[in-house]
Amino acid sequence: MGFKDFLKNVTAQADEARKKYAPKMLSPEKRYARGIVSVCALLAMADGELEESEVEAASQFLMGVNEIQQYFGESDALELFSQLVNDLQSESTKGRAFFKMQTNKMIAEIKETVTREDWRSNIMLIAREMAKSNHAGKPGAHEQAMLSQLETTIGV
């Protein structure tokens, strides 16, 4: 297998993973679970970098939240978290504007796909806890900005 074949195979696998977790293809409950995973990724990457403490906090949330276990499954949630973080890291390497466009897209997806008010409130509770997961143990400026954007956009 040549490099082009390898690259084509990897791209096809990534496309399959994206389709598997595409918000519009999911049930409302799975959209809610995806929203939880998305806010974990957004807050972990709020400053454009991923810290070990943020990965640990996200893993604990994703393995400990009943809705994740009920609607999504831990391994699927962790796989999606990894995919979303990779997407954010990829955009971050292109520049702050590309990173911002990706975060805006992810937040808009939450707004469009998670419509129940109680689910949105729970997502924001998780976001607030996740914002404290950086090495300082409290939200920094980037985490605060991400929380404000989430609150404004999803309306909680």
Image (spheres, rainbow, N blue to C red):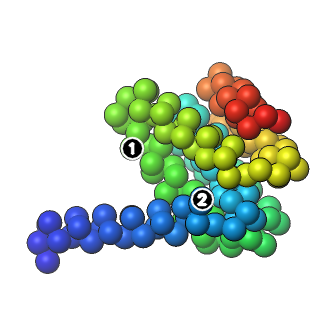
Q: Is residue 23 visible?
A: yes
The residue at the point 77 percent across, 50 percent down is 115
How packed mark 2 is, by other alpha carbons closer than 10 Å (few <14, some 14-19, many 20 or more), is many
Q: Amino acid at mark 1?
A: Ser
Of callouts 1 and 2, the N-terminal one: 2
Instruction: Write down the quadrant of residue 130 in the picture.
Output: top right
Between residue 10 and residue 140, name the one nearer to us.
10
The residue at the point 17 percent across, 71 percent down is 5
On the image, the x and y values in percent for residue 18 come to 47, 62
Q: Which residue is mark 2?
A: 23
The residue at the point 61 percent across, 47 percent down is 109
How much space separates mark 1 and mark 2, taking CA atoms?
20 Å
The residue at the point 79 percent across, 34 percent down is 155
Q: Nearer the viewer, mark 1 or mark 2?
A: 2
In the drawing, what numbered circle is on residue 17? none
Instruction: Write down the quadrant of residue 22 in the picture.
Output: bottom right
Helix, strand or loop at mark 2: helix
Between residue 118 and residue 24, name the one nearer to us.
24
Q: Amino acid at mark 2?
A: Pro
On the image, the x and y values in percent for residue 17 come to 46, 67
Q: Which residue is mark 1?
A: 90
